[in-house]
Image (tube, rainbow, N blue to C red):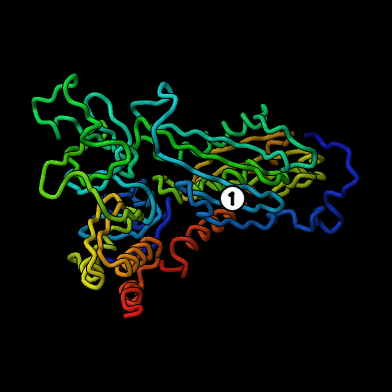
C-alpha cells in the first residue's frame, strides 16, 4: 500500500495500469481524483477517501435519521444524504397495514429521531428498516452532527476511539454512518466532554495527533 | 466594446497599464474556501477590486418537480449583483446581463461536475457580486468551482477562469474595468487545467486570427495562475499544513 496523498478534483494520482475505485476516474491511462480527500493505492486499485460531502447510502449501514414527513404509505427520513430515506408503513404495522385504519403519525411524527438500517439502495430513494435489535425510535439523548467522512476516524481502528470516549465519560454513544450521533449520559460534565471530543474530530482535517487531542479533552478537570 | 474615449492612459511607454501591472500580469487574487456555515460549500474571492461570495447547496430535491431529470442531476446557477456592487445603485431584480452570465457560468461548470451520479437532484450555485471591477464572470466562475469542491460534489477537474484582451493595440492579461470599457477586446476563458479543456470562451471586440490565438494562449496562462490559488485555498481549509503531497 502506498502512502496516502492529499488530492483535489482533477489531480492525477497515478499513471498506468490501475483500477479506478471510489472517487477516481480514468482519463486515458491517468487516474484522477474527483473529490477533495486522501488517495490510496492498494492491490492495483486506487481510491480517494473524501474529506467533505454528504452521506452516500450503502446497504446494511446503520443510520440515524429525522422524520421529515409522511404520506399514506411511508415516512420520509432525513439521513444527511442526497436522497431522503424511505421507511414504509409495513415496517412498523406489519403485513396487514391498512391506510384507512392505521394512522402513521401515531407511531412516528415529524422531527422524531430513529435509528435504522439501510435495507436497499436502488435507483429510487434508499429504503430503511427498523426491524432489528435496538433499532427504532430514539426517545432521549443529545444529537450531534459531523461530516460522514469523519465517521471512520471517530470510530477508530476496531472502534478503539469511540470506546475510549465511552469509557472515560460513561456515555452511551450511537454512531450513524451518515454523520448523525446520539449521546446518552447521566453525568452532564461527561456528556459535554464527549460532545466536545466528537465535534473536535468532526472539525479537524489534519489527523495527526488526534488521539492525543481527544485524550487531552477527556483528561480535563479529572 | 470598441475603444470608447477615455482620459486614462491604458498603456504607457514602458508597457505599464493604468493600474501599474505589466501586460502579462493578473491582478492580486485571494480565495478562501468554506466561509459560510449554512451552505454545503462556499468560497469568497477577491480578484483585484472584485469581491464575490459563492454558496453551493445540494445535490438536493428539485423544486419545481417538473425540472428534475430522471437520468441526471441538474445544475442551476444564479449570478447576482448586489445593488451596492457598482457606482450607481443597481436594481436588485435580475437583468438580461445577469441572466446571460448565469447561463454562461452554468455551461462552463457543467463539463466538470459529475451530475450523472445524482439523478433527480439539483445542485444550486449562488454567486453574489459584492463589488464589481471588471471580469466578474471569470472571478465568479473561479469561486463557484472552489465552492463546488468544498461541497464535496464529484468533479472531473476544477474550472479556473481568467480573461485576456486587447487595449492600446496590445494583448493584455486579466482585463480590468477601465480596459474593458475603453479597450479593443475582452476574451473571458474558462479552463479545466488537468483535462486541458476550455469550458468558456467568449469574445467581445475585434481581433485578427493571429491575435486570437495569442490571446487564448495568454488567457490560459492566467487560468493556470488562478488554478494554483484555487488549489491553495482548498489545501488551506482541508490540510492547513499545506504540502502533504
Q: From the viewer's perspective, is B27 left or right of A38? A: right
* As drawn, A210 above or below B164: below
Q: Residue at x 67, y 26 (%)?
A: B96
Viewer-closest of B25 and A123: A123
* As drawn, A176 above or below A67: below
Residue A10 in percent (x, y) is at: 43, 51
- The quarter holding residue B31 reads bottom right
Q: Which residue is mark 1?
A: B223
- The quarter holding residue A47 reads bottom left
Q: From the viewer's perspective, is B74 left or right of A149? A: right
Viewer-closest of B217 and B193: B193
Please rate how many residues cluster around mark 1, counting C-alpha atoms within 10 Å: few if below 14, some from 14 to 19, many from 20: many
Residue B227 in percent (x, y) is at: 54, 54
Chain label for disc 1: B
Residue B78 in percent (x, y) is at: 57, 35
Viewer-closest of B209 and B150: B150
Q: Residue at x 50, y 63 (%)?
A: B236
Amino acid at each position: 500500500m502506498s502512502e496516502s496523498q492529499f488530492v483535489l478534483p482533477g489531480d492525477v494520482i497515478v499513471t498506468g495500469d490501475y483500477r479506478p475505485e471510489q472517487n477516481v476516474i480514468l482519463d486515458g491511462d491517468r487516474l484522477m481524483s474527483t473529490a477533495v480527500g486522501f488517495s490510496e493505492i492498494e492491490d492495483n486499485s486506487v481510491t480517494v477517501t473524501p474529506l467533505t460531502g454528504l452521506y452516500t447510502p450503502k446497504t446494511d449501514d446503520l443510520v440515524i435519521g429525522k422524520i421529515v414527513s409522511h404520506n399514506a404509505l411511508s415516512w420520509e427520513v432525513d439521513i444527511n444524504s442526497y436522497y431522503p430515506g424511505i421507511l414504509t408503513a409495513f415496517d412498523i404495522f406489519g403485513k396487514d397495514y391498512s391506510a384507512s385504519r392505521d394512522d402513521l403519525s401515531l407511531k412516528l411524527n415529524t422531527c422524531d429521531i430513529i435509528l435504522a438500517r439501510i435495507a436497499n439502495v436502488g435507483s429510487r430513494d434508499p429504503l430503511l428498516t427498523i426491524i432489528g435489535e435496538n433499532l427504532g425510535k430514539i426517545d432521549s439523548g443529545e444529537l450531534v452532527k459531523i461530516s460522514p467522512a469523519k465517521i471512520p476516524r471517530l470510530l477508530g481502528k476496531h472502534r478503539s476511539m469511540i470506546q475510549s470516549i465511552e469509557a472515560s465519560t460513561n456515555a452511551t454513544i450511537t454512531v450513524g454512518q451518515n454523520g448523525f450521533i446520539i449521546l446518552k449520559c447521566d453525568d452532564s460534565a461527561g456528556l459535554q466532554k464527549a460532545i466536545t471530543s466528537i465535534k473536535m474530530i468532526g472539525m479537524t482535517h489534519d489527523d495527526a495527533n488526534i488521539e492525543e487531542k481527544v485524550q487531552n479533552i477527556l483528561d480535563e478537570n479529572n | 466594446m470598441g475603444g470608447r474615449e477615455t482620459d486614462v492612459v491604458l498603456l504607457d511607454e514602458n508597457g505599464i497599464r493604468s493600474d501599474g501591472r505589466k501586460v502579462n500580469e493578473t491582478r492580486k487574487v485571494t480565495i478562501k474556501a468554506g466561509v459560510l456555515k449554512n451552505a454545503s460549500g462556499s468560497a469568497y474571492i477577491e480578484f483585484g477590486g472584485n469581491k464575490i461570495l459563492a454558496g453551493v447547496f445540494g445535490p438536493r430535491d428539485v423544486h419545481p418537480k417538473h425540472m428534475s431529470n430522471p437520468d441526471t442531476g441538474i445544475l442551476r446557477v444564479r449570478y447576482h449583483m448586489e445593488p451596492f456592487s457598482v457606482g450607481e445603485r443597481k436594481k436588485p431584480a435580475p437583468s438580461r446581463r445577469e441572466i446571460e452570465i448565469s447561463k454562461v457560468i452554468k455551461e462552463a461548470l457543467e463539463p466538470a461536475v459529475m451530475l450523472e451520479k445524482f439523478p433527480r437532484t439539483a445542485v444550486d450555485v449562488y454567486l453574489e457580486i459584492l463589488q464589481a471591477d471588471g471580469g466578474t464572470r471569470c472571478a465568479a466562475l473561479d469561486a463557484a468551482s472552489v465552492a463546488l469542491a468544498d461541497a464535496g460534489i464529484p468533479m472531473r477537474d476544477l474550472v479556473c477562469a481568467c480573461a485576456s484582451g486587447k487595449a492600446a493595440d496590445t494583448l493584455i492579461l486579466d482585463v480590468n474595468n477601465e480596459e474593458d470599457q475603453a479597450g479593443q477586446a475582452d476574451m473571458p476563458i474558462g479552463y479545466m487545467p488537468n483535462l486541458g479543456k476550455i469550458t468558456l470562451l467568449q469574445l467581445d471586440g475585434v481581433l485578427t486570427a493571429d491575435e486570437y490565438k495569442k490571446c487564448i494562449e495568454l488567457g490560459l496562462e492566467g487560468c493556470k495562475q488562478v488554478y494554483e490559488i484555487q488549489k491553495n485555498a482548498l489545501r488551506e481549509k482541508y490540510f492547513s499544513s499545506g504540502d502533504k503531497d
